[in-house]
Amino acid sequence: MTTRSNTLQAVLDGLMSRYKERVPDVATILQAMIRGGIIKEEQDIENDHIAFRTLGVPHLGIASLEKVFLYYGYQRRDAYFFQEKKLNAYWYAPPVAGMPRIFISELRVADLSAEAQNIIHQYTDKVQVDPVDQLDLGDAAAVDEYLHSSSWDLPTLADYEALAKESEYAAWAIYNRYYLNHYTLSVHNLPQPYNDLAAFNAFLEQQGIVLNDSGGKIKQSPDGNLLQSSTVAGMVEAAFAGGDHKTIPGSYVEFAERRVLEQFRHLPASEITPAHRREGFEAGNADKIFESTYLEQAGKR
């Protein structure tokens, strides 16, 4: 691997390490898969993609965060727009086979009410230059620290709750910053019958895992080739400015089945590569997956 690839791997390892600490469902799922003989060890899992949430304001948002991953060789691909949730997003293809895709979404802050915009700007306006421009992207430890720290002050509980009434995404992002929103376990390369998302969901529910049922437990693209499901976010104890505490939604785990494209279904299984499977994302699927951190879903735990 090149120096940049090694640095990227260290950054990804740092993200996953802290994510696993905050999302106990990851260990629960992996341990159950090992006990059930589905995998022998965690390294057998293919990470389909990881996702970040950002705030669309000057010096932050997609335009800022993507610089980190473009530096390491990721390539920006398709754009997505979520009108109801007031979000933009892009996905990014990895520079090295086997590394996860990246999905970065951004709240269209200017589309919110004046009250919500004012709350967000009272925090983010203190960011006068793009923080990524100040980073040594060749220093994995520095990048890891940045992704797990905040460029703005800790919000008050009152501000968090005011934002949540209008946009639960906004409330999540103002508190959690760039902590991984989710990582995604690929199911299509698992042994039968677990390479089918419906069967894998049934396995998860047998372990007591609660799945997001917004739009159905399986979200399927119109072409039928991208199937996704997710846990509901775990509730975490959050400390707010002024000493207030509240249990709020944290992060979650996603699952994806990328089916072989019709023109390649004649190939024997031994010849199937990622290039033969459905690529990219689907706005309709993602729209419902976002709700994994909404109280209507997270409150089901």
Image: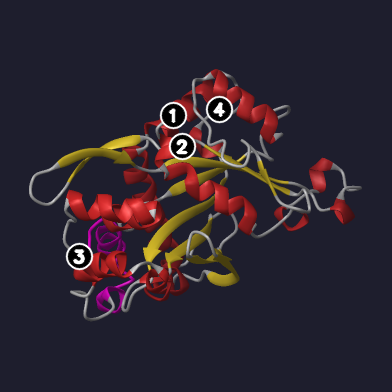
Measuring 38% from the left and 51% from the top, which residue is drawn there? Answer: 168
Image point (56%, 62%), residue name: 96
Q: Which residue is mark 2?
A: 297
Residue 166 x, y percent position in the rendering: 37, 56
Observer-side mark, 2 or 3, equals 2
| Circles 2 and 1 in contact, beta carbons < 8 Å | yes
Point out residue 89 in the picture as x, y percentages from the top left corner: 52, 66
What crowding class fits label 3: few (fewer than 14 Cα within 10 Å), some (14-19), or many (20 or more)?
Answer: some
**Residue at figure coordinates x 21%, y 39% from the top left:** 246
Mark 1 or 3 closer to N-term?
3
Q: Give the magenta-colored segment's residue range.
A: 131-151
Disc number at residue 152? 3
- Residue placed most toward the observer, 61 or 287: 287
Q: Amino acid at mark 1?
A: Lys
Task: Please determine whether, in this image, residue 107 is positioned above or below residue 260.
Answer: below
Task: Estimate how packed mark 1 is, as few (under 14), some (14 to 19) or many (20 or more) residues with alpha carbons within 10 Å.
Answer: few
Residue 163: quadrant of the picture: bottom left
Relative vertical location of residue 67 with respect to residue 21 in this rendering, above or below: below
Q: Mark 3 or mark 4: which comes first in sequence?
A: 4
Tag 1 residue? 300
